[in-house]
Amino acid sequence: MIKKYNVSGFEVWEYGALTSTNTEAEQWKREELKDKRVVLTYRQMSGRGQATNRWESEPNKNIAVTVVLCPPCYEASRQFAVSMVCALGVYDFVSKYVEGVSVKWPNDVYVGDKKICGILIEHTVAGRFIRSSLCGIGVNINQTVFLSDAPNPVSLFQLTGKEIPLDKAVEELLACIGKRYGRIEEYEVLERDFMECLYRRQGIYRWEDEEGEFEASVVRIDEFGRLVLKDTEGTLRVYGFKEVAYK
């Protein structure tokens, strides 16, 4: 059974249970991939993370959504803007409840050194433009115990000691994403805000690439969404997703 309703300017399709919200959205026909349409479930059985990773979510405790975004005539070369919209929207939502929130490149959301949200974005491109983006977002809300081997999960309940009604959390989350999405044409503004809340933005830290470990600081995110680091020898290093790891 599917319930359909509008929340914070989004059209929500709520399912009783799903294997994965992104997988469900992928089954939609082209005409169903409408801007600001949302797949929502509180019972996601096998949420997808990056690569072969899985996202743990206890039934009826957390938010699992896929937000469909179809920005009109938006250049595919600037598709990282969609990632920034989602990450900053989640950042704004979590920041309503706790301090110490950051965005870990490319789009995980952390509180301190613990992960509270994972985001998986899959684009469909037509020529030079983005046709649609499926933005899978999992936010840990009321879960008290995590059983997977993920190294550092955390929920808002663990951080605040208070349970948050899930419908309220969804409304607030979508409102925050919608506000950021309304400024998607302002790429430089998104980029500035993204850098200001970037995890480990200040200081020198250890990293690892295919050649081994090194120390470096973050310089910027380039126009393709790649991470630009400066190592302790003054050399700039540019990395795409999964080409470098935090240590």
Image (spheres, rainbow, N blue to C red):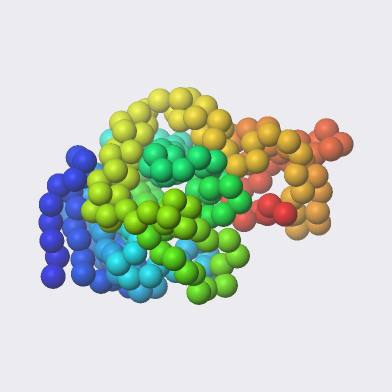
Q: Residue 172: x and y, percent? A: 29, 43
**Residue at 57% across, 54% down:** 114
Q: Is residue 180 left or right of residue 155?
A: left
Which residue is found at the position 75% from the left and 44% from the top?
205
Residue 234 visible in the snapshot = yes
Q: How many marks?
A: 0
Which residue is at the front of the view, 127 or 31?
31
Assign the N terminus to one quadrant of the image: bottom left
Q: Quadrant of residue 72?
A: top left
Question: At x 32% / y 53%, what residue is drawn?
Answer: 164
Q: Is residue 42 above or below residue 135?
A: below
Residue found at the very far front of the displayed protein: 161
Q: Nearer the viewer, residue 247 or 121?
A: 247
Residue at figure coordinates x 87%, y 36% from the top left: 233
Residue 82: horizontal and vertical position, in percent?
41, 41
* Quadrant position of residue 201: top right
- Residue 224 appears in the figure: no
Residue 24 left/right relative to 118: left
Instruction: For the C terminus, give its image quadrant.
Output: bottom right
Please indicate whether residue 175 sits to the left or right of residue 3 in the image.
right
Q: Position of residue 117 (x, y in %)?
A: 46, 54
Vertical arrangement, residue 164 with respect to residue 187, above or below? below
Left or right of 75? Residue 243 is: right
Residue 58, x across and y down, in percent: 38, 70
